[in-house]
Amino acid sequence: MVRTITAASEIDRLFAEGTRAVHPVMVVFALPTPEARGPEGRVLFVAGKRIGSAVRRNRAKRVMREALRRAGGPWPGLDVALVAREATISARPDELDRALERAAARFGRER
């Protein structure tokens, strides 16, 4: 089961202090998981209203969730936020996989 980040203060901290990896199909933020939360990695999926209707936003989150699963995430010891872009919905699975591989390498995590 994937643990999600729910506390607003932790989400704000992730976006303010996290390392960012930008790709045309998504933006990925990562920050070490607070020790009080345990060693497991956690994840947050974000699809803002600029993506479109609720149907499009939900699809973007599903696509990112599946890409993260294929990439072996969430990674132990990291809080990760995946932020959808308009291209996320129409991106091919291999494009999403490449985006997450590049992000994982930037954060020091390999498949």
Image (cartoon, helix red, strand yellow):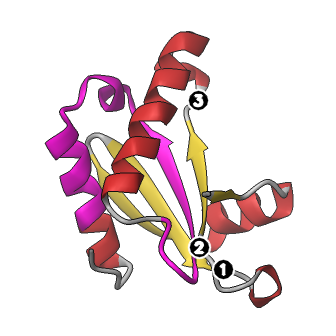
Vertical side of 90 occupied by 13: above or below: below
Q: Is residue 100 above or below residue 91?
A: below
Give whichever of 71, 89 is nearer the camera: 71
Look at the numbered disc 1 and give the secondary structure of its residue: loop
Secondary structure of the residue carrying numbered label 3 = loop
Near mark 2 (Cα within 10 A), the count class, few <14, some 14-19 or many ≥20, is: many
Residue at coordinates 46% horizontally, 44% vertically from top-left?
65
| Pointer 2 with pointer 1, Cβ within 8 A | yes
Asked if 49 appears above or below 95 in the picture, the reply is above
Measured as percent of width and height from the top left, residue 89 is found at 34, 25
Name the residue beneath numbered marker 3.
Answer: 48
Compare marks 2 and 1 and give the one earlier in the sequence: 1
Q: Is residue 41 above or below residue 108?
A: above
As helix, strand or loop, the secondary structure at mark 2 comes to loop
Q: Residues within 10 Å of mark 3 (few under 14, many from 20)?
A: some
Q: Residue at x 18, y 33 (%)?
A: 92
The residue lying toward the viewer, choosing from 59 and 105, is 59
Estimate the spatial distance between the alpha carbons at disc 3 and disc 2, rounded to whole Å. 23 Å
In which quadrant will I find the C terminus? bottom left
Name the amino acid type tagged 3: Gly
Q: Position of residue 29 (x, y in %)?
A: 50, 63
* Mark sitting earlier along the chain (3/2): 2
Instruction: Name the residue that disc number 2 marks.
Output: 41
